[in-house]
Amino acid sequence: MSTEDKTFAGADASRDAGKRSPFAKGIGVVRFLLTTWKVNLAAAMEYRLSFLLLAGMMFVNNLIWLFFWSLFFGRFPVVHGWELGDVMMLWAVGAGGFGWANVLFGNFHRVAQIVSSGQLDVYLSQPKPVLLNALASRMSVTAAGDFLFGVVIYAWAGEHTLAGLGKFAMGLAISGLLFMGVMLIAGCCAFFLGNSEGIAQQAFNSFVSLTTYPADIFRGMARIALFSIVPAGFISYLPIGLLRNLEPGFVLGAAGMAAGTCLAGAWLFRAGLRRYASGNAVSMRG
């Protein structure tokens, strides 16, 4: 085949690929993600003892925090309507949501570092969705302990009915999406402000900390900020507004905020790509 024939054949193939239906493209993305997660898990299991130790240490770390909360509620059984069981479920949905997000999309809180260091070149050079490729290319080993912790605490203190399980699963989904959306927005600052790893790290630490305290202990402007500027309140109120008493307004607001932050983060990432200057960091990923 001549060079000209190959050129036309390549152009035809590109046009055929571009004509794929949205459903076919969606199936392709799902297959890509499943393959990526399979490879990540296989890589993590190469060092099984290390995997188990790291995940186990995170599980124990979370359990120690709950132990201190149990001491507190042993002295003050009810605080602003919250009981020990509510705080246990707060940690279950918070740690569990963070866990699944960090296992499946382990780079969601490292976007600023990836952009600032030029590592984004690796993903730009591959024929895959850039954002999904960047987020899913890493699995956090310790986050497996967070997710397991959430499941165990639900089994211990949660509502053991089909409805209770459904609400807990919804809480995990909202929690994980909020973590990803907020950190993606913070990480995209690197496109517009330059090196913003410090900003992203501060946002990450603040958001994680605020999700571990009952939402009702905050009042006034702090509470408003908790449900707007730093929407950690949509996680920290889940044990009351979703798991204990299903409040449709709160649930819709939480789901909307979770979806909105993720969409805003994806839009900012796409806008930032237009400003991105290559760091000449192209390399091979196994």
Image (cartoon, grey):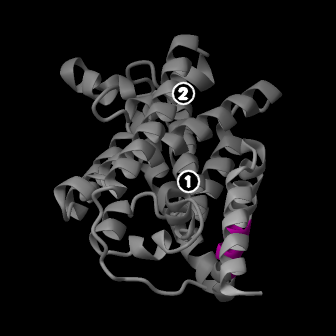
Residue 253 part of the magenta-drawn span: no
**Residue occupying image coordinates x 67% and y 42%:** 154
User: Does residue 59 appear anywhere in the picture?
Assistant: no
Above or below residue 34? Residue 219 is above
> Where is residue 105 shown, x and y percent of the image?
55, 59
Where does label 1 land, which residue? 101
- Residue occupying image coordinates x 72% and y 43%: 22
Left/right of residue 82 with respect to residue 273 in the rendered view: right
Circle 2: residue type: Ala
- Report whether 185 appears left or right of 107: left
Circle 1: element type: helix
Up-down relation of residue 53 to residue 257 (above or below): below
Which disc, if any, is residue 255?
2
Residue at the spot x=47%, y=41% of the render?
Answer: 262
The magenta region covers 35-42
The location of residue 99, given as percent across then percent down, is 56, 55
The amino acid beneath tag 1 is Ala
Compared with 127, 255 (above or below) is: above
**Relative to the observer, which residue lies in front, 4 or 153?**
4
Q: Is residue 19 above or below residue 2?
A: above
Farthest residue, direction right = 162
Secondary element type, mark 2: helix
